[in-house]
Amino acid sequence: MTPAASLVFTTLLSHGPLTRSEVARRTRLSAAAVTKAVRPLMELGYLVEGVHEAARPAVGRPANLVWVDGGRALFIGVKVTGDEIIAVLADLCCRVRVSRHLRLTGRKPETVLPALTALVQELLTEADGFGVRVRGLGIAISGDVDRSDGLVRYSPFLEWRDVPLAEIAGTATGLPVTVDNDVRALTVAEHWFGAGVGLSDFALVTVGAGIGCGLVVNGRVVSGAHGVAGEIGHVSLDPLGPLCHCGNRGCAEAIAADPAILRAVRAATGRQVRDAAEALDLAHGNDPGVRAVYARAGEAIGRAIGFLVNLLGSERVIISGEGLAAYDLVAEGVQDAFAASAYGTAAQCDVMTRPLPFEEWARGAAATAIQSFMGSDMYEE
Amino acid sequence: MTPAASLVFTTLLSHGPLTRSEVARRTRLSAAAVTKAVRPLMELGYLVEGVHEAARPAVGRPANLVWVDGGRALFIGVKVTGDEIIAVLADLCCRVRVSRHLRLTGRKPETVLPALTALVQELLTEADGFGVRVRGLGIAISGDVDRSDGLVRYSPFLEWRDVPLAEIAGTATGLPVTVDNDVRALTVAEHWFGAGVGLSDFALVTVGAGIGCGLVVNGRVVSGAHGVAGEIGHVSLDPLGPLCHCGNRGCAEAIAADPAILRAVRAATGRQVRDAAEALDLAHGNDPGVRAVYARAGEAIGRAIGFLVNLLGSERVIISGEGLAAYDLVAEGVQDAFAASAYGTAAQCDVMTRPLPFEEWARGAAATAIQSFMGSDMYEE
């Protein structure tokens, strides 16, 4: 697809049915450029033009709208966590049609890959019922992932190193495969359908087992020249702080991620606290030492977001992840520390929270598959 | 100009004369799109096509090249520091034809603006000799500058607040005026002509009276949704560190900028060290306390660059500014701290130094004027 066609397509994905002149206004393309972009996509049936049910006026002649025909193609999106695989079957509008979960019995590639393949096969069987081909598979994995090579360089949670995932999954399923960092994939979905619609500069910060960050700058997701980007979890906030698995001290992840909070709660209480849920119970029971741990985590998140916004001038920061379960305990710390570290007008950035269940992450993976489809073989049948 | 025309134009600005097919290859545009982009620019005389002296082969038929006719338009670029104004007259290829310096007797707008206007008038008189119109004026100012409004929101060195500089300078000179943050303007010049040519993700970090940073992400300079961006100087590296003028502790600027170094050298030696040059002499005289100050500054710069690269995955970081005078004293600290804080493949980023005299900054201001010219009134005569 040409850059103009891609812009028109994603605009229609984000905003739903629009008139051609509205497409031109939103994309800042000329009417002629919109026509040129739209024509081949209509010929292939990916776009449809006509009177849309959503815009039939009570009185007068209805406007002619253009929209993406969601039913024209299917995609599978998969998110792999340390404990389970979440997979969705999504249409070309990235609407979830079917979703599946599978608990993992181990984290090694030998265990995860056959489970992933089986789950994809299940969804491929489901897809038969729609009578439309599945055109791509997107897989979202935490860690250092090289999308261009489809390589998982290093995933700390899975303890994977240099797994050529796109190649393996492509051979096993026969589908074109896109592998991307999970937070980056979720950022694509947020940009197209979520709290990032219409924004050219925003960040998604996920707090939970780790701290992740997806960035959109100048309207595009940042991937980094060498694959690493958005590593806000390894901003060292305190040279005397707790040791991080990356080798530095005082990283945001070593203060505010679930394992760090758990360690600090155990140290504060002297009790063998089992998991994040138990730590949360103690905090809600008003144990001041435990509350201080969460307050410190909030401060770390707020400062890290402050650095990010000072650097990029983002319009919005969306905080999400399993860590939101404790957000009432960290909210004040986040807000105060962000306000203190934001420089000048950077403080105008809208810092918001938004729960995004793992199914949304899998949907993000499907969105990366749609991206790849748009980039490459859309014109082949 | 259309986005395609702008891409073709800046590619020719960066790379000099190219064949049409080479333009297509570098811009990833189709031959037809290149033709469409080039035609109006040739009709207006901004681009020329023919046999270029730089590419006449010893044997055989010379290739037909396209290039920017530098002599077709002139621009003035101005950099204002706390002490002086540096102004250049540049052609459409952003080659400096004439340059002028003027010492300032004060920093208030009432002092700076008439001096600036006088210097621009001088260059306008010089321009008469070229027989070509000056089509724009670019002004580069440190601090929080809103380019879209031409407003200097806050410049700490000049102690300016809310100065509508574009409006004032436009009225005084009769020229279309572009006002931008000085490091951002220099980043444009580095992207077009310097160490950032051909890179889609790089950063320019300037160390001196303050710490500045210009970012190019996905091929475009980052401006931030609210005007602030690149504030790497206000990454707080140490909650117990020295107090910064921004109100936080341990900011990179409060450790590694010239005033901070001077303060720390005075504290370490108990002597009334006059300026950066004297501090440098003491360090080169092997005073261990003074050397430790520079080592700490180097560590701060390296860590701040590490954060930046972890977040953006930049391919290159260019360190420049007056602070390079002390680079032999900070180099090791920069390298070690960067290596320690870079996460995974982010460490592959090429961290380099590059001296850029103030004339280059003024050239950057001229480059922003060329950008504005390309964006707006290029087709008017």
Image: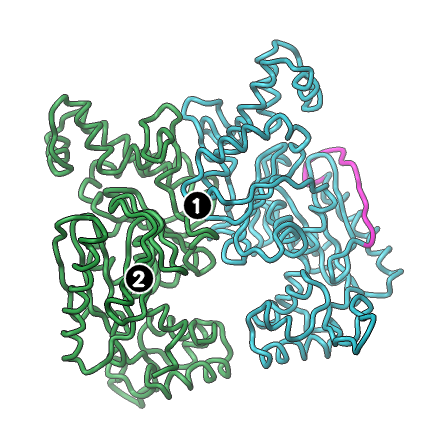
Chain colours: A cyan, B green
Residue at 16% x, 59% y: name it: B115
Front disc: 1 or 2: 1
| Quadrant, the C terminus of chain B | bottom left
Q: Can residue B318 be seen from the camera position used here?
A: yes
Query: Which label number is shown at residue A357?
Result: none
Q: Find disc 1 in the rendering and name its residue.
A: A345
Q: In this view, does A120 lie to the left or right of A8?
A: right
Query: Which label number is shown at residue B189?
Result: 2
Seen from this angle, which residue lies furthest top? A270
Question: Does residue B53 sit above or below A133 in this rendering?
Answer: below
Chain ID, mark 2: B
Crowdedness of circle 1 by 10 Å Cα count: few (<14), some, many (20+)?
some
Residue at 23% x, 61% y: name it: B78
**Which amino acid does the dot numbered 1 rest on?**
Thr
**Which amino acid does the dot numbered 2 rest on?**
Ala
Question: Where residue A183 sits: x, y (%)?
Answer: 61, 45
Q: Quadrant of residue B331?
A: top left
Looking at the picture, tell me which residue is in the foreground, A24 or B54. Answer: A24
Crowdedness of circle 2 by 10 Å Cα count: few (<14), some, many (20+)?
many
The secondary structure type at the circle numbered 1 is: helix
Question: What segment is highlighted magenta in the picture?
Answer: A97-110
Q: How many numbered discs?
A: 2
Q: In which quarter of the image is residue A62?
A: bottom right
Q: Any magenta on residue A109? A: yes
